[in-house]
Image (cartoon, rainbow, N blue to C red):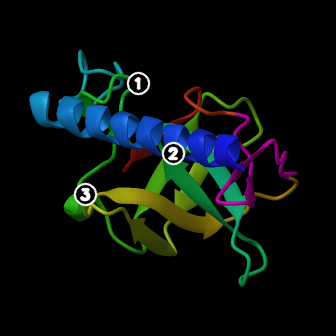
Amino acid sequence: MAKNKTIKIAVVVGALLVIAYVIYKSKQEPLKKQSGSGSANDLPDGCYPLEEVHEVGSIAGEMWVSIIPASVNGAYDLRPPANSTSIGSQFTISETGSALDSTYTINSIWHDERGDIGALRVDVPAGYNFNYNATQGGDPRDMTFFGIGKVCLI
């Protein structure tokens, strides 16, 4: 019984140390906005790295297209600012072969905790089959084109 309590305390202390380190590192190098070519993602202005896609649970025939939030080292915010586009505007997905490469009309926009655009809701392209190869919060996600696909606002 005492051994289990010691293990639990060690796990909690370890978790607190990890959280403290992450907070410490985030204070040292604040996120910078993307500046187009030459930035952390080396994409043209108005283009962002594709994170994942998944169906909209309550709306048949629609999907969310998510944008990677930050560079691997956390130094660059890779998502577009909230005022970059709006419902009814269009964007393209490229670098996915014929799977998702197309022009899409935005049906809805999801903003992340910083207010940046985190995901765009669009119609699922005809014939696209989701390859749910990951989960996020227990929900299935198609991350086939993670970091490969490119989302470009028009």
Assign a secondary structure to mark 3. Answer: helix
Q: Residue at x 24, y 27 (%)?
A: 75
Mark 1, residue position? 72
Q: Nearer the viewer, residue 10 or 51?
A: 10
Q: CA distance from mark 1 to mark 3?
A: 23 Å
Is the residue marked by circle 3 packed among few (<14), some (14-19), or many (20+) residues within 10 Å?
few
Q: Residue at x 25, y 59 (%)?
A: 114
Cβ atoms under marks 1 and 3 closer than 8 Å: no
Q: Note whether 122 is above or below 149 in the view shown.
A: below
Horizontal and vertical percent position of residue 39: 24, 21
Q: Is residue 129 magenta?
A: yes
Is the residue marked by circle 2 packed among few (<14), some (14-19), or many (20+) residues within 10 Å?
few
Which quadrant holds residue 32? Answer: top left
Cβ atoms under marks 2 and 1 closer than 8 Å: no
| Amino acid type, mark 3 | Ser
Which segment did they paint magenta?
Answer: 128-144
Query: Which label belongs to residue 9?
Result: 2
User: Comparing marks 2 and 1, which lies closer to the viewer?
Assistant: 2
